[in-house]
Image (cartoon, rainbow, N blue to C red):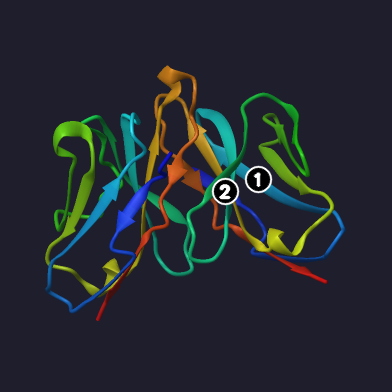
Amino acid sequence: GQNIDQPTEMTATEGAIVQINCTYQTSGFNGLFWYQQHAGEAPTFLSYNVLDGLEEKGRFSSFLSRSKGYSYLLLKELQMKDSASYLCAVTRYNTDKLIFGTGTRLQVFP
Amino acid sequence: EAGVTQFPSHSVIEKGQTVTLRCDPISGHDNLYWYRRVMGKEIKFLLHFVKESKQDESGMPNNRFLAERTGGTYSTLKVQPAELEDSGVYFCASSLGPGQGDRRLFFGSGTQLSVL
């Protein structure tokens, strides 16, 4: 079966750095996605990791450790507009469907 | 370029009625997915089309749900008859797919379905 865990809620201050963790247990793992979703809007793609290591894209970075079943999303220089839900999702071999965690709701305060 | 569009954005119906949701994927995307988020739960896969063919419908809850993608363009998801537990947000997503070197899914804003 599949199990994906991420914290339900996090808070942070504008300008700070926040790390959102995601752990997973899934057979046939073949990559991990992070999506951002503002309330009432479509989830939007942030990052995709299939190999171990850190992928950096502007203020956002994503890390993957396949051996540990662990990923994190790092958000730097937080802005108010970063307040949103962050969804961790994994894919498996021979399928393109995403298996989602419940998401982490991040609130950024001034 | 237009994104994934879904219609309607909200639907309120009574138990036992029928509702049809529509999804227009990004032009050129052969892969189309339906997902659902029930309140308090994670987004869950319903089914996957490749062009007009159902590639995977393992997530469909029961035979009250019928998805179609005639012509391989837009898709509809019909719920008949609707039950209270069908309430939730129904998301559609499309992708080029790994065959095109791009596994990203692009999501629509969803249809909020409320069954009373």
Label 2 SS = strand
Q: Nearer the viewer, residue B92 or A5?
A: B92
Vertical relation: B96 (above or below) A3: above
Q: Residue at x 48, y 68 (%)?
A: B40
B29 sits to left or right of B61: right
Q: Quarter of the image holding residue B48?
A: top left
Q: Position of residue A53 (x, y in %)?
A: 76, 28
Mark 1: which amino acid?
Thr
A25 sits to left or right of B52: right
Mark carried by residue A70: none
Q: Residue furthest right?
A: A16
Q: Position of residue A106 (x, y in %)?
A: 69, 63
Which chain is mark 1 on?
Answer: A
Mark 2: which amino acid?
Ile
Label 1 SS = strand
Q: Residue at x 87, y 58 (%)?
A: A16
Image label count: 2
A57 sits to left or right of B101: right
Q: Of label 1 and label 2, which has the lower sequence position?
A: 2
Which chain is mark 2 on?
Answer: A
Q: Which residue is labeled 1 in the image?
A: A23
User: Quarter of the image containing the C terminus of chain A?
Assistant: bottom right
Vertical relation: A110 (above or below) A61: below
Circle 1 Cα neighbour tier, 10 Å, few/some/many (<14 / 14–19 / ≥20) = some
Q: Position of residue A41 (x, y in %)?
A: 49, 60
Q: Which residue is labeled 2 in the image?
A: A4
Q: Residue at x 14, y 54 (%)?
A: B63
Q: Residue furthest front?
A: B1
Whether residue B19 is visible here, answered yes or no, is yes
Asked if marks 1 and 2 touch (Cβ < 8 Å), the reply is: yes
Whether residue A1 is visible here, answered yes or no, is no
Q: Position of residue B65 (x, y in %)?
A: 18, 55
